[in-house]
Image: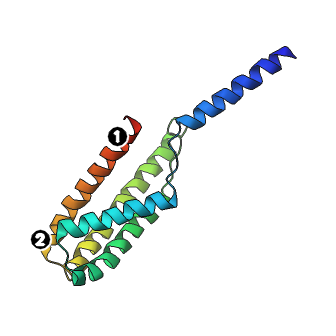
Amino acid sequence: MRIGYCITPILIVLAVVTAAAQPPMMNKEARERIEAQRVAFITDQLHLTPDEAARFWPIYNEYKDGLKDLRDEFERPDLESISDEEASKLLDKQLQQEQKKLELRRTLVTRLRTVVSAKKVLMLQRAELEFNRELLRKVQEKRNP
């Protein structure tokens, strides 16, 4: 009986420590704040006029939604326990997903060219990369002050 009294507090401590070690899920408010910052950053970097922005953002948001749908449908199995046959199927599925991502990007570029200059479409890629780098840097600063 005494062992049960010792193990229970240890299990509780382990559960609390494990939960605390997990990165917190980003809440809706934080995601919306980041998205607003992304919009402001890209709009500024591309020097979008109000008219361009009004036509640009629905196209870009549709592209981002398509990427999210692809991420959501992708399986993340335990790689240590899957068979070679399952791994082969997973590789094929990954290649199909990459092809879909390329198609989404191609559609984005084609549609954006009707809204903004080709130069601004190229600038978008750099702006996305710079925003993501800055966001990653901020996250790392918060984790390691």
Q: Is residue 129 visible?
A: yes
Residue annotated with mark 2:
119
Q: Is residue 136 above or below residue 63?
A: above
Left or right, 50 with respect to 8, comes to left
Asked which secondary structure carries label 2, the reply is helix
Residue annotated with mark 1:
141
Q: CA distance from mark 1 to mark 2?
A: 33 Å
Identify the image quadrant of the N terminus. Answer: top right
**Residue 27 placement (x, y as % from top left):** 52, 56
- Looking at the image, which is closer to me, 62 or 28? 28
Residue type, label 2: Lys
Left or right, 78 with respect to 131, comes to right
Asked which secondary structure carries label 1, the reply is helix
Q: Is residue 2 above or below residue 22?
A: above
**Residue 127 placement (x, y as % from top left):** 21, 60
Residue under the image location 49 percent in, 39 percent down: 79
